[in-house]
Amino acid sequence: MFHQTAEIQTKNIGEGTVIWQYCVILEGAKIGKNCNICFNVFIENDVIIGHEVVIKSGVQLWDGVTLEDNVFVGPNATFTNDLLPRSGQHLIEYNRTTVKKGASIGANVTVICGITIGKYAMIGAGSVVTKNIPDYTLWYGNPAQFKGFICQCAQKLDKTLICKKCNRKYRMNQGQLKEF
């Protein structure tokens, strides 16, 4: 379903995706299946959105952003694509930003371009993300700082690395948290 007030220029939208009021989606954007793109979202040309992605109201996705499957982007989150912006200067190639499968980005988060947010990572509301975020980690603050490990189901893990909610088990492998 596409709301009648949305301006949708791309034909690359998967089945079951819903686009709400006053969204603008440019011609080159690619959007997967069963996404929910809420009110007043702007999606530029060189943007790739996977399947089952939720993008809440007021988000802008500029050239160079990729959201993999099952990503959640909270209201008014901001992505950048130029580390040294100047009026009248246009980049030939934009800094790439990737948000990996299952990651969640809270409301009003700012993501500086050129980084990767890992699988199932969670970024707390109002944070400013300035560097790569590893898989299964929780970060928040300005700048965002590591606050612990997080399960795929979004529960913070304790020292045992066994989720108290869903019983998934994790272990450290070469400095990275991995499910086993």
Image (tube, helix red, strand yellow):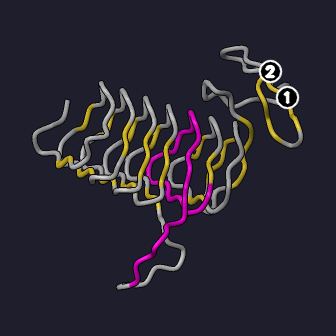
Residue drawn at x 59%, y 41% is 100
Residue at image point 59% right, 58% down: 129
Q: Residues within 10 Å of mark 2 (few under 14, many from 20)?
A: few
For the residue marked with disc 2, what is the amino acid?
A: Phe
2 or 1: tag closer to the N-terminus = 1
Residue with the mark numbered 1 = 171
Please check the rendered image and state whether residue 87 is part of the magenta-colored stretch, yes or no: no
> Tag 1, which secondary structure?
strand
The residue drawn where x is 35% and y is 56% is: 45
Magenta span covers which residues?
89-115
Residue 95 drawn above or below residue 154: below
Rendering quarter of residue 142:
bottom right
Q: Distance between the Cα atoms at labels 2 and 1?
A: 7 Å
Residue 180's label in the rendered image is 2
- Disc 2 to disc 1: CB gap under 8 Å: yes
Residue 58 placed where, x, y %?
A: 32, 51
Mark 2 residue element? loop
Tell me which residue sits at (49%, 44%) in the image.
67
Residue 92 lies within the magenta run: yes
Disc 1 marks a residue whose amino acid type is: Arg
